[in-house]
Amino acid sequence: MEQIGTFAASGYTIRDLHLFRDIDDQQIACALGGCAVVRLDTGAKVEDSNRARLYIVLRGALAVEADTRNGMADGTVSKILPGESVGEQSVLDEAANLASISALEESELLVIEGELVWKLIDQSNGLARNLLRLLSFRIRAANALLRRRQKLGEFYRQLSMNDGLTGLYNRAWMNDMLPKLIATAHRAGTPLALVMLDLDHFKLFNDSHGHLAGDDALRAAADVISTALRPSDFALRYGGEELMVILPETAEPLAVMVADRLCARMREAPIFRDMRVPLPHITASFGVAMLEAGMDDSALIAAADAALYRAKDGGRNRVAR
């Protein structure tokens, strides 16, 4: 960063500087006259001192990557164009600039020391208003960016909670939500049912028809479940060919009825790898467990799993309690 002159000798006026727009004050123009104008080569960084400074672009453009020294850097880069400034926050904090500033092209910058900025603010209400407007705009922009990131983060969080093959919730979702649903049921004294199902002879199906057909079978089973449940119910892929249905506020007779309906619909679900060659239907075994006093998620899952094995031992393609 090389000093090439002063503002008074640069040919620029305060009207070229956004912070000083609409300010017709000769005293301010005189005060800025002695401030240094520096040249920054393309790609070069502003080597900041421990003093707070305000930098205003006279020519060229700067890239500003915020907060690189305090652990908050996230790759966000702002572009500062002629007339715009950087370093206002450091001046207000009376601290060194925490932004990484580099030239996108050969640039000329006006450098205003922090002490002088404060003196000019004391002299000019117009400068104070412009500074407040600028900071307000940046706060709004930062809040908008934060909201977008939060929405994107929630999108990816939701994406991580769904099984990629079936579209149902996955085990990570279950680990997070099932304890909460159980706690709610215990607190409210309402019933909660868990239905665990396993596609019958799925390994044989895969060996006979291939893994792509097996994937089709899992998707068909997931579709049977998701289209048959109420909006208040939840379906997830527990692992492999095992699926699970959580039925809040559902008494045992209704839970068994739901499982029977799903079992019947599963038998009717066709599996097609292409529209010309139908593959065999699939069946599933179902185990129904009810939440009891003192049960946690592990105990409820174990009860549903035990019921599922009773259905398998009873000949599969059936519901057991």
Image (cartoon, helix red, strand yellow):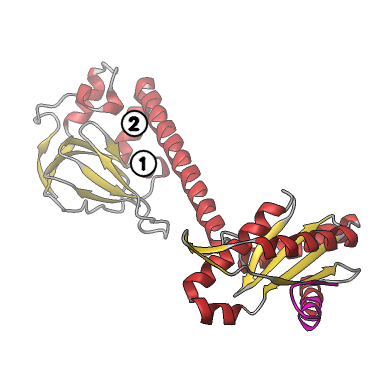
Q: Is residue 213 above or below residue 44?
A: below
Q: Nearer the viewer, residue 211 or 76?
A: 211
Is 272 placed left or right of 227 in the picture?
Answer: left
Residue 302 rendering spot, x and y as whole percentages: 78, 78
Q: Which mark is residue 91?
A: 1
Q: Nearer the viewer, residue 43 or 273?
A: 273
Secondary structure, mark 2, is helix
Q: Which mark is residue 33?
A: none
Residue 261 rendering spot, x and y as whole percentages: 77, 59
* Residue position for label 2: 119
Is 49 placed left or right of 7 in the picture?
Answer: right
In the rendered structure, which amino acid carries the disc numbered 1? Val
Residue 39 rendering spot, x and y as whole percentages: 12, 44
**Among the 4 quarters of the image, the one containing residue 205:** bottom right
Q: Nearer the viewer, residue 7 or 140?
A: 140
The magenta-colored residue range is 307-321
Q: Residues within 10 Å of mark 1 (few under 14, many from 20)?
A: many
Q: Is residue 207 above or below residue 154?
A: below
